[in-house]
Image (spheres, grey):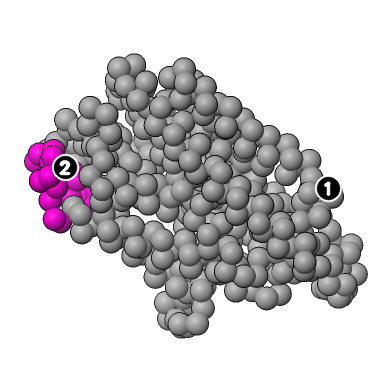
């Protein structure tokens, strides 16, 4: 991590700010898109849920490892814990960026605080996001400041308490986030408590993929991956092969249940063999299921780090696509099936005429800016914080 890493950070910073700034300058998404009255939640919302899910899933995985005292082969997970905690914390930031910039007037976000409604799932999201961020920040500071690596028997009570707080906060956030959609009777594809289990399974899968990929990249640049590649590839294979069947089991039963409810089935039939079917079968099924399963088996059997990387990237791509299909197509299917008249632009059009969605230019730029912001902030932490197992703070309490 030398001058080249610092230059990479500056480049990512400039590109991210340029994309976000230009996206805002072009006009916020709600002002640019003619479909906004029919599609109140555009592509920035799947992006926001994607990053939030990664943060939640990574937090859950870390907390479970800590609570049960699992340190990994040769203390590997224990050595990586500061990196993984920082990853979870930073993954929340792009989510905040996207949800704030998705508002017609971002300054109206203060209304959630000034006029808090305890029956609003979105209002509670703000509380739970803050709670998770605080617990992760406390955990990170604690891990940076501790002076020894504890054994399983002597794990500190403070660390255990923090891990439990992070776990509870993460599950509370993701379940409440799912019901921000699941409590909407007006969107049949979303309505129901089933989204809680679906979101949690997806979060753990995405969190595992994102966190594992980040740590292996860091290990690779530091030159310490080779001696641990067998363990890392094995861990990735085991995690993905465990979580994938659970996620797709929920998907299967969601489809079966939808068969008995016509408004909900309008969403799934469009997903399975309608205009969106190529996206579902090509990305969610092939890239999100078949490729990760095959790559995970190879990673586990052959100890192939390359196969594990392929599985991780495939899961992240399919994970975003899954959020896009659920949240965007869910809204379109409602408009298509209900048959009511809806206001679009300057006039009323039949609902079936809006069975499409084209992201506004500003939405695309803002989404790209958030995706660049993510590695930029991760790199900033590597440069500024002592996240390695053998690194200690030297400046301002927690900095290198």
Mark 2 neighbour density, 10 Å: few (under 14) some (14–19) many (20 or more): few
Circle 1 residues within 10 Å: few <14, some 14–19, many ≥20: few
Q: Quadrant of the N terminus?
A: top left
Question: How many numbered discs?
Answer: 2
Q: Foreground residue, 262 or 165?
A: 262
Measured as percent of width and height from the top left, residue 145 is found at 13, 45
Part of the protein shown in magenta: 138-158
- Dot 1: what SS? helix
Image coordinates for residue 70, horizontal then vertical, percent: 26, 41
Q: Quadrant of the C terminus?
A: top left
In the image, taking residue 343 as reference, residue 5 lies left or right, namely left
Q: Residue at x 84, y 58 (%)?
A: 355
Helix, strand or loop status at disc 2: loop
- Residue drawn 57% across the image and 32% down it: 292
Q: Which residue is mark 1?
A: 273
Question: Which numbered mark, 1 or 2, is in the foreground of this view?
Answer: 2
- Is residue 27 at least partly visible in the picture? no
Q: Is residue 17 left or right of residue 215?
A: right
Is residue 257 highlighted in magenta? no
> Residue at 66% of width from left, 57% of height from top?
253
Residue 152: image tag: 2
The part of the image, by quadrant, that contains residue 45 is: bottom right
Q: In the image, is residue 281 above or below residue 235?
A: below
| Rendered image quadrant of residue 168 | bottom left
């Amino acid at each position: 991590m030398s001058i080249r890493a610092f230059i990479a950070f500056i480049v990512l910073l400039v590109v991210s700010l340029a994309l976000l700034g230009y996206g805002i300058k072009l006009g916020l998404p709600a002002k640019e898109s003619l479909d906004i009255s029919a599609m109140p939640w555009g592509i920035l919302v799947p992006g926001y849920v994607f990053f939030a899910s990664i943060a939640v899933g990574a937090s859950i995985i870390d907390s479970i490892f800590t609570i049960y005292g699992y340190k990994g082969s040769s203390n590997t997970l224990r050595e990586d814990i500061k990196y993984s905690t920082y990853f979870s914390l930073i993954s929340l930031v792009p989510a905040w960026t996207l949800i704030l910039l998705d508002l017609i007037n971002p300054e109206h976000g203060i209304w959630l605080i000034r006029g808090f409604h305890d029956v609003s799932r979105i209002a509670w999201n703000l509380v739970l996001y803050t709670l998770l961020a605080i617990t992760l920040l406390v955990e990170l500071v604690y891990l940076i400041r501790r002076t020894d690596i504890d054994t399983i028997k002597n794990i500190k009570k403070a660390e255990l308490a923090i891990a439990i707080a992070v776990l509870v906060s993460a599950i509370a956030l993701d379940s409440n986030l799912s019901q921000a959609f699941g409590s909407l009777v007006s969107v049949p594809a979303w309505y129901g408590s089933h989204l809680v289990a679906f979101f949690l399974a997806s979060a753990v899968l995405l969190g595992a993929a994102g966190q594992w990929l980040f740590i292996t990249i860091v290990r690779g640049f530091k030159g310490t991956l080779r001696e641990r590649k067998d363990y890392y590839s094995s861990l990735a294979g085991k995690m993905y092969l465990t979580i994938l069947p659970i996620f797709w089991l929920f998907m299967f039963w969601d489809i079966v249940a939808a068969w008995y409810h016509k408004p909900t089935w309008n969403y799934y039939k469009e997903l399975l063999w309608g205009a969106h079917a190529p996206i579902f079968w090509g990305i969610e099924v092939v890239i999100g299921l078949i490729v990760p399963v095959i790559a995970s088996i190879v990673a586990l059997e052959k100890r192939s780090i390359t196969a594990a990387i392929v599985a991780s990237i495939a899961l992240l791509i399919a994970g975003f696509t899954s959020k896009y299909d659920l949240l965007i197509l869910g809204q379109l299917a409602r408009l298509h099936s209900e048959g009511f008249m809806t206001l679009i632009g300057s006039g009323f059009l039949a609902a079936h005429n809006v069975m499409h969605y084209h992201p506004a230019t500003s939405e695309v730029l803002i989404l790209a800016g958030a995706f660049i912001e993510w590695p930029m902030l991760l790199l900033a932490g590597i440069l500024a914080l002592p996240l390695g197992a053998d690194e200690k703070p030297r400046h301002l309490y927690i900095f290198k």
